[in-house]
Image: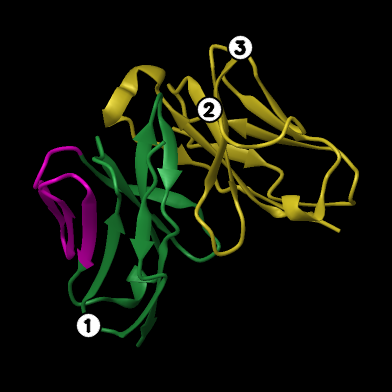
């Protein structure tokens, strides 16, 4: 049973460029959430996808966008990269109907460095 | 939305000593989860607490949820080098959005 998989694991981009990160949720999960974790900080919620729609969004600019596909996998896109976007990007999968008893499973993350 | 403050930010102990991290909120929490993130790794779910005064144990780890549901703690008895990492508390808001504390980074001197 595959857990949450993310690709790529590391990425270096130049300021102003665009990047796409990918996530495949744990088997049986239908909800994907994306988090940004700056060095030494806790993960910050970016947004969440269920049934191919964005369901919740954190305090991130419109440069951050996403998509969920019919197979529940998801992409995170960031446009016009800034140096401050350098961080570990984590994908978490869960079950939409899990409510308060839902445990989030995190992928290994994508380490994005903007130079 | 609910926010949680976690203290201390860092803790260095000798192997075999105990360790405690605290998570506090100014508002009543509906639930609290604890995660561990090893250096270079990703957050891994440890436990969820939902009931007032709840205490749960996992081997050397003891988790508590305050009576007023405004604070929680994680206590590790007799730390081992495998306990190294950052421990985060988190609250579920809305539909499974996690709001994390700042984390407590635990380092251990063997």
Residue B63 x/y as whole percent: 18, 55
Span of residues in magenta: B50-75
Left or right of B92: which side holds A110? right
What residue is disc 1 on?
B17
Q: Chain of mark 3?
A: A
Please name the residue shown 36% across and 35% down the image.
B92
| Nearer to the camera, B29 or A107 | B29
Left or right of B34: which side holds B10? right
Q: Residues within 10 Å of mark 2 (few under 14, many from 20)?
A: many
Q: Which chain is green?
A: B
Please name the residue shown 43% across and 48% down the image.
B100
What is the count of numbered marks?
3
Label 2 secondary element: strand
Separation (CA) of disc 1 from disc 2: 38 Å
Give the number of the mark in front: 3 or 2: 2
Taking the magenta stretch, the answer to whether it contains residue A34 is no
Left or right of A66: which side holds B44? left
Give the number of the mark in front: 1 or 3: 1
Separation (CA) of disc 1 from disc 3: 50 Å
Q: Quadrant of the N terminus of chain A?
A: top left
Please name the residue shown 41% across and 53% down the image.
B101
Quadrant for residue A72, please give it.
top right
Residue A50 x/y as whole percent: 52, 17
What residue is disc 3 on?
A70
Drawing shade for chain A: yellow
């Amino acid at each position: 049973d595959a857990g949450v998989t993310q690709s790529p694991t590391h990425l270096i981009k130049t300021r102003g460029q665009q990047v796409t990160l990918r996530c495949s949720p744990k088997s049986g999960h239908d909800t994907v959430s994306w988090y940004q974790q700056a060095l030494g900080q806790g993960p910050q919620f970016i947004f969440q996808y269920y049934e191919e729609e964005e369901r919740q969004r954190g305090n991130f600019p419109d440069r951050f966008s996403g998509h969920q596909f019919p197979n529940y996998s998801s992409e995170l896109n960031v446009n016009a990269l800034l140096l401050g976007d350098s961080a570990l990007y984590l994908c978490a999968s869960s079950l939409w109907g899990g409510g308060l008893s839902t445990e989030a499973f995190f992928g290994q993350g994508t380490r994005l460095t903007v130079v | 939305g609910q926010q949680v403050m976690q203290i201390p930010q860092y803790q260095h102990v000798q192997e075999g000593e105990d360790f405690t991290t605290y998570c506090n909120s100014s508002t009543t929490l509906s639930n609290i989860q604890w995660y561990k993130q090893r250096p270079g790794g990703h957050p891994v779910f440890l436990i969820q607490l939902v009931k007032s005064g709840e205490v749960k144990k996992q081997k050397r780890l003891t988790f508590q949820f305050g009576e007023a549901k405004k604070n929680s703690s994680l206590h590790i008895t007799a730390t081992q080098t495998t306990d190294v990492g950052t421990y985060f508390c988190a609250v579920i808001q809305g539909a499974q959005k996690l709001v994390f504390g700042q984390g407590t980074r635990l380092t251990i001197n063997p």
